């Protein structure tokens, strides 16, 4: 799982730091940002859970690392003739935080169900 997560992060970085000839037809730029970071957040959440990281560490990662990484991602895009956009950052962080919240809710429900058995 760790290798998959690292590969996804490297792929995402590559994808956001290569000049883009155009967006995928019919898909909003913000949707791509939101869903891309949601996937990264899910992979990171699963990986951290499998590796025994506490809920606190997973939430700390989501609250601190994803917003900082998304900001650095946006701020460095002009280097490759792409645009830095605050709304892209908002979409990135929203996708990541929503997915982490969904994962943690799923983990909480799972724990409650185990206790009730």
Image: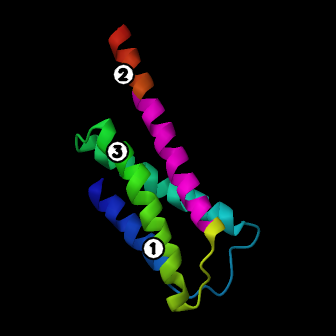
Q: Which mark is residue 72?
A: 1
Label 2 to label 3: alpha-carbon separation: 16 Å
Please provide percent x and percent y for residue 97: 51, 48
Residue 96 percent across, percent down from the top left: 50, 53
Please give the range of residues in magenta: 88-107
Give the mark toward the camera: 1 or 2.
1
Instruction: State whether residue 4 is above or below residue 82.
Output: above
The reply, left or right, for residue 109 in relation to residue 115 is: right
Q: Position of residue 100 (x, y in %)?
A: 46, 44
Q: Earlier in the sequence, mark 1 or mark 3?
A: 3
Q: Given the current orientation, which residue lies at the most extreme top position?
A: 117
Q: Which mark lies nearer to you, 2 or 3?
A: 3
Q: In the rendered image, is residue 43 in sight?
A: no
Q: Nearer the viewer, mark 1 or mark 3?
A: 1
Q: Which residue lies under the disc numbered 3?
A: 58
- Residue at which label 2 appears: 111
- Between 107 and 87, the one nearer to me in the picture: 87
Determine the image quadrant of residue 58: top left
């Amino acid at each position: 799982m760790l290798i998959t997560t690292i590969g996804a992060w490297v792929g995402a970085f590559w994808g956001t730091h290569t000049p883009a000839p155009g967006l995928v037809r019919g898909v909003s730029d913000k949707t791509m940002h939101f869903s891309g970071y949601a996937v990264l957040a899910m992979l990171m959440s699963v990986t951290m859970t499998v590796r025994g990281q506490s809920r606190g560490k997973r939430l700390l990662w989501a609250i601190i690392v994803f917003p900082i990484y998304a900001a650095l991602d946006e701020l460095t895009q002009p280097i490759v003739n792409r645009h830095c956009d605050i709304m892209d950052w908002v979409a990135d962080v929203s996708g990541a935080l929503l997915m982490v919240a969904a994962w943690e809710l799923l983990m909480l429900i799972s724990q409650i169900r185990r206790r009730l058995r």
